[in-house]
Amino acid sequence: MIYMKKEEFLQIHDAFLRSYSEKQTQWFVNVPRSIRFRWFLTATNPLNWTKVLDICGGYGEYASYMQAVEGRHFKYTCLDKEPHVIKCGPSYLKNFGMKGNFILHNIRKPFPLPEEAFDMVWLFGWCDALFDCYKLFNEVYRVLENNGIFMFNMAYAGKYKTKYDEKPLRELMKRTNFDVLKLEKIINGVDYVVIARKCNIARAEVTR
Ligand SMILES: C[S@@+](CC[C@H](N)C(=O)[O-])C[C@H]1O[C@@H](n2cnc3c(N)ncnc32)[C@H](O)[C@@H]1O
């Protein structure tokens, strides 16, 4: 099967945003897309996954890139709090021959999803300073299968900066029952990127 070239993907993506009069997000204004995708691909390529939950997923840019350009196939679910994102997400994915399940949801609340339903959770383009990470990561833990992967970044967003440095970040992962596989600081506005694996132990056994 021949997949879409990256340039073609980006043209369709930009045309879609223009058609909704949407400005490019300011969030990643200092992070060139090539850096984001390069990091994302390096991190995800060696891993096996088939059921992805994208929290704060927007229209599903990463998911469609992974499928359209990289030829990865998976079931895609997106949680986002913006009604217009949830409404337009399916037509964005359709541009790339993809389907997804878009659910209107504020991730400050427990996810409307069953336990152990996903083998990969993504959380990109958010700022931890605005959330209770302990609660949020517990929800991620709940919906992940054992050994499932959680990938996220701790980002700057306008005046907000991550409140976690490396040591507290590792502590947070430990307390929420994840093993850190990779933790890197990247430049240009995004602080830490993390790949973690859900520990294969019962929650009741965890001492806090
Ligand atoms: C900057 S976009 C990032 C989208 C995508 N993850 C990416 O990296 O390109 C942030 C998204 O998070 C969503 N969002 C922000 N706060 C949220 C919340 N509390 N619950 C659910 N979605 C939220 C916004 O609606 C927006 O679509």
Image (tube, rainbow, N blue to C red):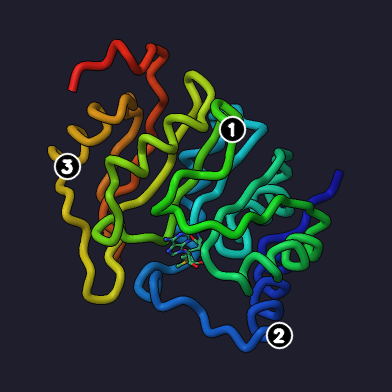
| Horizontal arrangement in the rendering, residue 206 relative to residue 126 (left or right) | left
Q: Residues within 10 Å of mark 3 (few under 14, many from 20)?
A: few
Q: Nearer the viewer, residue 202 or 34?
A: 202
**Residue 141: x %, y % from top left:** 42, 31
- Mark 2 and mark 1: Cα distance apart in space: 35 Å
In this rendering, is residue 88 above or below 150? below
Q: Position of residue 90 (x, y in %)?
A: 75, 62
Query: Answer yes or no: do the residues labelled 3 and 2 have beta carbons within 8 Å?
Result: no
At x 21% / y 57%, what residue is drawn? Answer: 162
Q: Residue furthest right?
A: 1
Q: Residue at point 86% right, 43% down?
A: 1
Q: Which mark is residue 114?
A: 1
Q: Residue 163 in the image: x percent, y percent?
A: 16, 55
Residue assigned mark 3 = 166
Alpha carbon distance from label 3 to label 2 = 40 Å
Q: Please identify the quarter of the rendering in which residue 172 is found.
A: top left
Nearer-the-camera pick, 197 or 142:
142
Q: Residue furthest bottom?
A: 21
Q: Please, what secondary structure does the residue beneath circle 2 have?
A: helix
Disc nearest the viewer among 3 and 1: 1
Residue 4 placed where, x, y %? 77, 58
Q: State the residue at coordinates (40%, 70%).
A: 28
Q: Circle 3 sits in a helix, a strand or a loop, which is it?
A: helix
Q: Amino acid at mark 2?
A: Ser
- Quick check: 81 left or right of 28? right
- CB at mark 3 closer than 8 A to ligand 1? no
Q: Which residue is mark 2?
A: 19
Q: In front: 66, or 83?
A: 83
